Image (cartoon, rainbow, N blue to C red):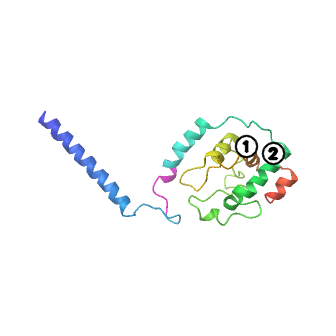
Amino acid sequence: MRHLHRTLVDFLAGLLLLLLAIYLYLAFGNPPVATADKPFPLEKKIASIPLKARIHREMPAASPIPATDDNLNAGASLYEDKCESCHGTADEPSAVGRTLFPIAPQLWIKHANGVVGVSDDPVGETYWKVKNGIRLTGMPAYSKSLSEIQLWQVSLLLSMADKPLPDDASHTIGR
């Protein structure tokens, strides 16, 4: 019994020391907190696992509005007003977006994997991100400033970044 008691005390003391070491590491400003800092080991993986799980659990399966010219043109106007400053256009990548951490994806250019923006994501995933935002990325939630229809309009537009768009939408996003 005495051996079990000693083991428990040792375990608790070790746990307290570990928590104190973590607190001191944080309190002295050692973690990377500036956007220019190198990422913390496994930071991207640690943040992406719960994000992906939550999005896939909560995202709508399909858009309740069709991808009509009117909806895509309205989505382009919303994009120009709310998104362009961080995510750029086809003609002009965002200078602001390159200074964020993580860097804001440029949604109208082809990425290294050959995909334009988020056009390979389900529209419901893009809708979830626009509606809820993403913590620790600078991506704000637009659920309070855009209506449900507007959220879907910009999400539909982004889902079609690799497809021909109506002339007004193409002109607005620089294609």
Residue 69 visible at all: yes
Q: Is residue 56 left or right of residue 174?
A: left
Q: What residue is at 34 percent from the left and 55 percent from the top?
A: 22
Q: Position of residue 123 (x, y in %)?
A: 70, 42
Residue 109 visible at all: no
The number of discs equals: 2
Q: Quadrant of the N terminus?
A: top left
Q: Give how far apart the Cα atoms at labels 2 and 1 are.
A: 9 Å
Residue that lies at the very extreme toward the top in this rendered image: 1
Residue that lies at the very extreme toward the front in this rendered image: 144
Q: Measured along the vertical axis of the image, is residue 53 above or below residue 43?
A: above
Give the residue at mark 2. Answer: 71
Q: Is residue 42 magenta?
A: yes
| Amino acid bearing label 2 | Asn
Q: Which stretch appears magenta?
A: 38-45
Give the residue at mark 1. Answer: 152
Q: Position of residue 55 (x, y in %)?
A: 59, 40
Query: Which structural element holds mark 1?
Result: helix
| Amino acid bearing label 1 | Trp
Q: Is residue 41 left or right of residue 114?
A: left
